Image: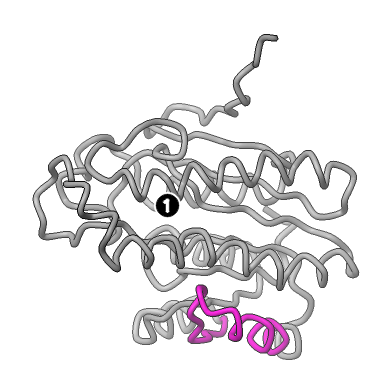
Amino acid sequence: MEELRDQVLLVTGGATGLGAATAIEAARAGARIAIFDVNEADGSAIARRTGGRFWRVDVGAAEEWAPAVAEVEAELGPIRFAHLNAGIMTRPLDVALSIPPIEDFAQGRYHDLVRVNIDGVVLGLQALLPRMMRGSGGAITLTSSMGGLAPIPFDPVYSLTKHALVGLVRSMGAAYASAPVRINAICPGGFTSDLFPPALHAIDSLTPHDVALETIDLLLRGATGEIRLILTKGQPAVTVAPPALAG
């Protein structure tokens, strides 16, 4: 991970879970860390732990991106890498897993998920890509999910948003094939995180640390447009190709 030394890494949703783990591992490799999150207490704690800086940014608010990115570059230097990781699920953690009623789609939570999980990524790309393209290039890795490749019956809205990111990365990968900025996505299985209900923690033995190491490898060596799936601790991650469409 020597390539990270003295490079600026921006992590959204960096206060807890996978984002925090990515920030910690990258800082160990010498990266300069910028954390965007709405969780000020935990975000500030991770910034102190990594020697980085925390900005309170609502990733779904278009007006907050440009000034925050400008501040990061003024204080830390040009952004070379970004992990667009912020995300939420539909159900509160204390709600039992079940097949959700269709009424879930009519509730404000649906709009919250789209705003954070999709808008938060698109707005990040809009703010970051022009700057990174003018600079020395780099990479942007999105956090999708196993649920971006397969059904999640207990949270179809979450799965909807993560499928959207897979489609976005594959399409932008083709459009930006020769660009100096690579765009790809990590698709983890369930792992111990504040994002997931406790019932999902036993599905496999992945930890945020495991997924963070794979995320950093994607940032450094992943192809543009690549979708990488990591499901089980100790097993190699795999690149998932788009389906072949027969005429």
Q: Secondary structure at mark 1?
A: helix
- Quarter of the image with the C terminus is top right
Tell me residue 116's x, y (percent): 45, 66
Tell me residue 66's x, y (percent): 69, 83
Above or below, 202 relative to 81: above
Q: Amino acid at mark 1?
A: His
The reply, left or right, for residue 222 in relation to residue 18 is: right
The reply, left or right, for residue 134 in relation to residue 213 is: right
The reply, left or right, for residue 20 in relation to residue 221 is: left
State the scheme by which the image is colored: one colour
The span picked out in magenta is 52-72
In the picture of the structure, the residue carrying the numbered disc 1 is 209
Rendering quarter of residue 108: bottom left
Q: Nearer the viewer, residue 138 or 95?
A: 95
Is 63 contained in the magenta span?
A: yes
Q: Nearer the viewer, residue 124 or 228?
A: 124
**Residue at left offset 13%, top offset 42%:** 98
**Residue at left offset 67%, top offset 53%:** 1
Above or below, 83 relative to 185: below
**Residue at left offset 34%, top offset 41%:** 206
**Residue at left offset 51%, top offset 52%:** 143
Rendering quarter of residue 202: top left
Check disc 1: other Cα within 10 Å, few if <14, some if 14-19, many if 20+. some
Tell me residue 37's x, y (percent): 46, 77
Q: Nearer the viewer, residue 160 or 213?
A: 160
Is 64 contained in the magenta span?
A: yes
Above or below, 197 relative to 75: above
Tell me residue 109's x, y (percent): 29, 65
